[in-house]
Image (spheres, rainbow, N blue to C red):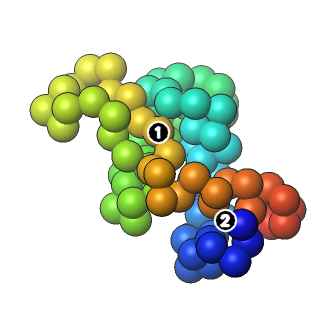
Amino acid sequence: MVRDVRWDDVGFVISSRYRVDVLERLDEGPATPTQIASDAKQPVAHVSRALQELRERSIVELLVPEDRTKGRVYGIADDAEGLWTVIEDQQIA
């Protein structure tokens, strides 16, 4: 598992508390930005920015149509499934 992870992505995630919080929450299952912000006790604006950054790196993905403005649900991308496990197992977050 550790061998397959993109370490550049690990470094990217752990360099931001907000990205760590978002990924940790999404590891439990898909969620909206409001749900993530509530669960992580972080401002929605910071969560939204972290989601955008993670999406740009294909770590998380939007699970509903792009044109949907309310109820946008995000999840961890298939290619990044093991990323949080590695971060957690290595205790680097």
On screen, residue 65 versus residue 89, left or right, reads left
On screen, residue 70 versus residue 40, left or right, reads left
In the rendered image, which residue does mark 2 sit on?
14
Name the image quarter holding residue 89: bottom right
- Amino acid type assigned to the residue bearing label 1 in the image: Gly
In the rendered image, which residue does mark 1 sit on?
75
Q: Residue at x 59, y 63 (%)?
A: 13
Whole-percent x and y of residue 32? 44, 27
Crowd class of label 1 (few under 14; some 14 to 19; many from 20; radius 10 Å)? many
Pointers 1 and 2 in contact (CB under 8 A)?
A: no
Quadrant containing the N terminus is bottom right
Would residue 24 be visible to someone looking at this image? yes
Q: Residue at x 26, y 20 (%)?
A: 70
Say whether disc 1 or disc 2 marks the residue closer to the N-terminus. Answer: 2
On screen, residue 76 versus residue 86, left or right, reads left
Q: Is residue 9 above or below residue 16?
A: below
Residue in front for this viewpoint, 51 or 63: 63
Name the image quarter holding residue 15: bottom right
Q: Residue at x 66, y 65 (%)?
A: 14
Q: Residue at x 32, y 20 (%)?
A: 71
Quadrant containing the C terminus is bottom right
Crowd class of label 2 (few under 14; some 14 to 19; many from 20; radius 10 Å)? some
Whole-percent x and y of residue 63? 34, 34
Would residue 50 be visible to someone looking at this image? no
Q: Secondary structure at mark 1?
A: strand
Residue in front for this viewpoint, 9 or 53: 9
Q: Secondary structure at mark 2?
A: helix
Total labels: the figure holds 2
